[in-house]
Image (cartoon, rainbow, N blue to C red):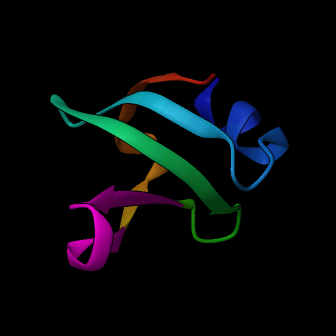
Amino acid sequence: MITDLLRILDPGTPVPTLVVGGATLTNLVFSSFNATTNLASFATRTGTGTNASTNIVTVNANQIQAITTA
């Protein structure tokens, strides 16, 4: 079950692929999972150098269809 995996993942774990509601997200880093709200957060980095930015993606764990970890 996805929520069981999210409960034991360490923050900072690379997540090469996450499928949520049919959309595929790539190159994420696991941030946290709140079992009470069932929300999982992931960070993604875009750009390079001084143009780099970090975005947070928060999803309902029930909507996660697949997850791969490195």
Query: Does residue 29 appear to the left or right of 52 in the view shown?
Result: right
Q: How many marks?
A: 0
Image quadrant where one finds the N terminus: top right
Q: Is residue 18 magenta?
A: no
Q: Which residues are magenta?
A: 41-55
Q: Is residue 54 magenta?
A: yes
Residue 57 lies in what quarter of the image?
Answer: bottom left
Q: What secondary structure do most residues of the magenta stretch adopt?
A: strand
Residue 64 in the image: above or below residue 17: below
In the rendered view, does 5 fall on the left or right side of 14? right
- When the figure is inspected, residue 64 is found, relative to residue 45, above or below; the finding is above
The quadrant the C terminus occupies is: top right
Task: Tell me what residue is drawn at x 59 percent, y 37 percent.
Answer: 14
Q: Is residue 20 left or right of residue 33?
A: left
Q: Residue furthest left?
A: 23
Up-down: is 46 above or below 7? below
Relative to the observer, which residue lies in front, 41 or 15?
A: 15
Residue 36 place in picture, x, y as percent:
69, 70
